[in-house]
Image (tube, rainbow, N blue to C red):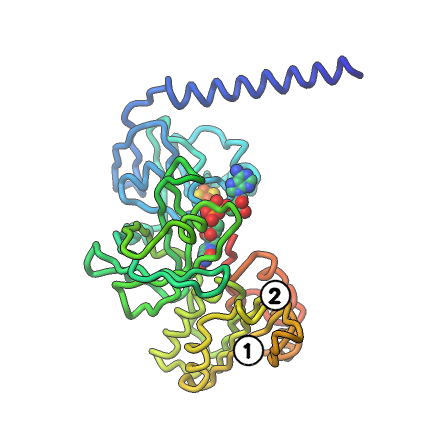
Amino acid sequence: MKEIFIGLLAIASISAALALIIELAGAYIANYGEKHILVNNKKDLVVEGGNPLLFSLMSKNIFIPSACGGKGTCTYCKVKIHEGAGPVLPTETPYLDKDEMKDNIRLSCQVKVKEDMKIEIPEDLFLIREFRSVVEKTEDLTPTNKGITLRITSPEDGILFKPGQYVQLQVPPFKLSKTSEFRAYSIASNADDTTHVQLVITKVENGIVSTYVHDYLKEGDEVTIRGPFGDFFLRDSQRDILFIATGSGLAPVMSMLYQIEGEEIKRKTTLFFGDRKPHDLYFQDQLIYWQKSIVNFTFIPTLSRAVEEDSWNGEKGRVTTLIHKHIPDNTPLDVYICGAPPMVESCAKVLRQKGIPASNVFYDKFE
Ligand SMILES: Cc1cc2nc3c(=O)[nH]c(=O)nc-3n(C[C@H](O)[C@H](O)[C@H](O)COP(=O)(O)OP(=O)(O)OC[C@H]3O[C@@H](n4cnc5c(N)ncnc54)[C@H](O)[C@@H]3O)c2cc1C
Ligand code: FES
């Protein structure tokens, strides 16, 4: 038994050492030289070989969606690579189904440009741009959520986005990270103001970008954002609208409510917002104002951890409780859900049970 264990340990150690040698060789010895990436059969990019495709494209101002900053966990960075990608990597297999593999879909943050490549991307990705901005305002909205307002300084015409979309926010290296990192954050502000974006960022324990924003970012700092990304935006329909949000998931909903106000959309609109305690509620003044100013808009907050001392007279429990209580079965509704993945999944399940078709349910999971 002891011999088997020692044998297994030896094999594991040799494999780990080999993997490390290959990685070091890749990083320090291999020189791939210049490589060509032909995009959509029309743009020929010349890049330094050896880097992940996601970052090679970024160096040429082509910005592929990415929420995790290239860690290989969000799966947003999928692109079609017709030639030059090599075999599918172990880091990609959990995220690609059989059809995608057959279709040459790959994770662009994992595939390195070691040969000339031919790739295909949606044309609208050419419209995504990088913006310089200055932090105009930071505010503690709740004990865990910080609001930051960025004034875009370049390009001067600012950012055109659909309410509900997100940007990538880039932060410099600091104590938690030797490299500059970026993550996805939904825009909370009014799309009519193209020179400002407001973001709401939840502090994540030991999370790189959120910690930087909460503990280091200050008014007057310069930051880079890229965007706009995402397909979480209002669909054109006659159905009533139900928004369900928790925590910073309220951000894109705020932007959509500015749109509903601005375009005087008269569809019956309800917002269920859930958090734990009264101090977790934010943007209350604006939401209460909209209750009066937007025709047919109802805002229902619910708290899951309110106790007697909180003197909370509103709804208690989770947002799923509100669906059970307020939404009759088979109501014709468009539902927009935003927040932590478990909340989104629980709500989607309850909505299915209530007979709301999955095709009318849209969501952004803040993974
Ligand atoms: C479309 C979209 C929109 C989003 N919009 C928003 C928004 O508006 N507001 C918002 O707050 N968030 C939003 N998010 C989430 C956001 O993009 C980030 O995922 C979040 O802020 C965490 O990033 P971070 O850099 O702080 O944490 P990360 O550094 O990515 O870490 C995430 C978690 O992993 C752990 N971790 C990190 N490294 C290690 C390691 N080596 N070993 C073990 N554990 C590790 C951390 O402790 C942490 O718990 C959105 C996500 C998506 C996909
Ligand atoms: S960028 Fe997130 S998986 Fe590739």
Of the pair 4 and 100, the residue shown nearer to us: 4
Disc nearer the start of the sequence (2/1): 1
Residue 74 is at least partly visible in this image: no
**Residue 207 location, x and y as percent?**
49, 46
| SS under mark 1 | strand
Q: State whether residue 299 is above or below residue 111.
A: below
| Residue matched to label 2 | 347
Split into 4 quadrants, where in the image is the N terminus?
Answer: top right
Residue at position x 58%, y 68% in the image:
277
Of the pair 322 and 352, the residue shown nearer to us: 322
Q: State whether residue 93 is above or below residue 234.
A: above
Is residue 231 toward the left or the right of residue 244 in the image?
left
| Residue matched to label 1 | 300
Residue 23 is at least partly visible in this image: yes
| SS under mark 2 | helix
**Residue 312 location, x and y as percent?**
60, 78
Residue furthest front in the image? 309
Q: Is mark 1 within 8 Å of ligand 1?
A: no
Residue at position x 63%, y 68% in the image:
304
Residue type, mark 2 in image:
Cys
Task: Give residue 14's quadrant in the image.
Answer: top right
How crowded is the residue under tag 2: few (<14 C-alpha within 10 Å), some, or many (20+)?
many
Residue furthest left in the image? 156
